Amino acid sequence: MDIVFGEGFPTPDGRSLLVPASIVPPAEEPDTTRTGRKTHSQA
């Protein structure tokens, strides 16, 4: 497997920038009637 950004990030100082993000619920639940699989909420 190749290493991405092994020599630094494409920023002026070569460092990464981590930005916090909020967790949002999905817009819709998966359709289990076609796959027969159960989601974690159905287990």
Image: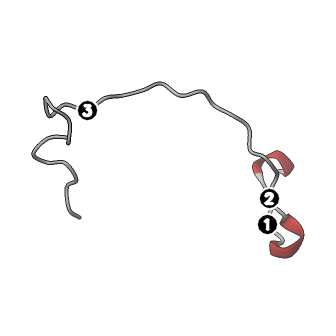
- Which amino acid, mark 3? Ser
Q: Position of residue 8 (x, y in %)?
A: 14, 41
Q: Which amino acid lies under the numbered mark 1 shown in the image of this protein?
A: Arg
Relative to 23, does residue 37 appear above or below in the rendering? below
**Label disc, if present, on residue 30 of the rendered structure:** 2
Q: From the viewer's perspective, is 25 left or right of 10? A: right
For marks 3 and 2, the one nearer the N-term is 3
Front in this rendered view, residue 30 or 8: 8
Q: Secondary structure at mark 2?
A: loop
Q: Is residue 25 left or right of residue 3?
A: right
Q: Residue 37: image x %, image y %? A: 79, 66
Q: Position of residue 12 (x, y in %)?
A: 15, 32
- Please name which of the two marks, 3 or 1, marks the residue nearer to the observer: 3
Residue under numbered circle 1: 37
SS for callout 1: loop
The quadrant holding residue 9 is top left
Q: Which residue is mark 3?
A: 16
Residue at point 25% right, 32% down? 16
Q: Amino acid at mark 2?
A: Pro
Task: Give the number of callouts.
Answer: 3
Q: Residue furthest bottom?
A: 34
The residue positioned 84% from the left and 71% from the top of the image is 36
| Residue located 69% across and 34% down the image | 24
Cα separation, mark 3 vs mark 2, equals 34 Å
